[in-house]
Amino acid sequence: MADSADQIKVKRVYGRRMGRPMHKARLDVLDTILPVRQIDSAILTEKSDLKVSEIFGRDVGKVHFEIGFGSGEHLHYIMSQHPDDVFIGAEPYINGMTTFLKGFSDPVPDNFRVHADDALMVLNSLEKASVDFLYILNPDPWPKSRHHKRRIVNESNLDVYARVLKDGGVMLQTTDVDELADWMLMQTLKCKDFEWTAETFDDCKTAPNGWMATRYENKGKDAGRTQTYLSYRRIPRTRAS
Ligand SMILES: C[S@@+](CC[C@H](N)C(=O)[O-])C[C@H]1O[C@@H](n2cnc3c(N)ncnc32)[C@H](O)[C@@H]1O
């Protein structure tokens, strides 16, 4: 357990934490599943030395991390595709968290952990080169220029994503907001630790193999918007710091 001096600082999360009032049946998962699958906040520290194996209490294989998983459709899907891997998801919107947790039947698998708050609290705590796959799917666009600093893909957060990804690790960003797609690509390419894996521009308009579109993505398509998929590789540390 961390000294209180090391304890991670809680920053303000922009966006809503609560939506419509929930029925008791939905709220039950917050008393049953959440306490046993959430990351103990006492192990989140400013020291950036937390091992994923400490979070799970055992050795782990490949590590997937999803920032802002919404209702968790994508997280459930990738869990079904990679049953031997481990999964960490952060989502402060409590209605989304309950939807995700309600999607499990007994026995609830032990290969995932959640954080009902800012993903950066967990990412900043992790030791470097901890994560194999990082997903940032349809992040809030914050369209007004004075709110751009709230965007989850920004210069300082990209340094954190580069730090926690393993050499060759993958970061996937998606959005159906064209201006945000341009922003995320520009911000990420400014970071010397990432290379864009697209070979042609069309690649970013084509879903990765085996992709499952979330409800959010499908709603955008129904409204005539086009989804952009931006996939990057973490450049090995021998080639970049
Ligand atoms: C537009 S929604 C997209 C949800 C989901 N990724 C999808 O594609 O369906 C963006 C989500 O990011 C979450 N979010 C915003 N800031 C966050 C942060 N700092 N850490 C974790 N999640 C965050 C919001 O609560 C919201 O649920």
Image (spheres, rainbow, N blue to C red):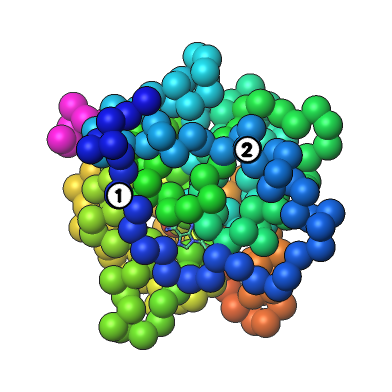
Q: Position of residue 226 (x, y in %)?
A: 57, 73
Q: Position of residue 105 (x, y in %)?
A: 83, 37
Give the Cα separation between the discs numbered 1 and 2.
21 Å
Where is 96 relative to 88, above or below? below
Where is 34 relative to 207, above or below? above
Quarter of the image with the N terminus in it? top left
- Residue depicted at 81% across the width and 57% down the height: 24
- Residue depicted at 32% across the width and 29% down the height: 2
Q: Which residue is mark 2?
A: 35
Majority secondary structure of the magenta segment? loop
Relative to 100, is 14 on the left or the right? left
Which stretch did the figure color magenta? 236-241
Q: Which residue is mark 1?
A: 9
Camera-side residue of 151 and 17 = 17
Q: Is residue 30 magenta?
A: no
Camera-side residue of 119 and 164 = 119
- Residue depicted at 39% across the width and 31% down the height: 43
Where is 140 relative to 64, above or below? below
Camera-side residue of 162 and 115 = 115
Quarter of the image with the C terminus in it? top left
Residue lying farthest front? 4
